[in-house]
Image (spheres, rainbow, N blue to C red):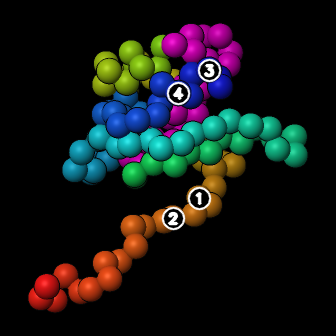
Amino acid sequence: MREALPELEGEHDFSCFQASGCDAATPVRQVYRNELFKWEGHWVYRIEATGYLRHMVRNIVGTLVDVGLGERGAGDLLSLIQARDRKAAGPTAPARGLFLVEVRYDPLPSKPLDAES
């Protein structure tokens, strides 16, 4: 599963991980960081991105579990992303155990936008 993580990083069209009913203007997101580690006996998947599509993280986790079970290869994620087909990705992981830890925004400009230069 860890070997698959680098394929998720960078700017991609994440349509393959987007749930139906998502009203995002675009499925393009940039993943800055994602990691998988064990903590206190539990597997933790951490992801940082410019934004998330409906069920994107749950669908990524379901696909990573498929990799861990040997149902798909670690090198399959990039081709999956390029195919942009939700049906080709793994199942949606249950919401139980999913936590939003932090939301960060770009800092506000030092001057109001309507201020003259």
At label 2, the amino acid type is Val
Q: Is the residue under label 3 in contact with that under label 4 (CB below 8 Å)?
A: yes
Asked if residue 16 lies left or right of residue 33, the reply is left
Give the percent coordinates (x, y) of residue 59: 50, 34
Could you classify mark 3 by the number of other residues whose Cα lies within 10 Å: few (under 14), some (14-19), or many (20 or more)? few
At label 3, the amino acid type is Glu
Farthest residue toward the front?
117
Occupied quadrant, residue 80: top left
State the SS at label 3: helix
Q: Residue at x 37, y 29 (%)?
A: 16
The stretch in magenta equals 52-75
The circle drawn on residue 103 is 2
**Magenta region's main secondary structure?**
helix
Q: Residue at x 34, y 33 (%)?
A: 12
Residue occupied by mark 1: 100
Is residue 42 magenta-colored?
Answer: no
Is residue 70 magenta-colored?
Answer: yes
Q: CA distance from mark 4 to mark 3?
A: 7 Å
Could you classify mark 2 by the number of other residues whose Cα lies within 10 Å: few (under 14), some (14-19), or many (20 or more)? few
Give the percent coordinates (x, y) of residue 64: 59, 26
State the SS at label 2: loop
Q: In the image, which is nearer the foreground, mark 3 or mark 1?
A: 3
The circle drawn on residue 109 is none
Residue 76 versus residue 108 in the image, above or below: above
Q: Is the residue under label 1 in contact with that under label 3 (CB below 8 Å)?
A: no
State the SS at label 1: loop
The circle drawn on residue 6 is 4
Residue occupied by mark 3: 3
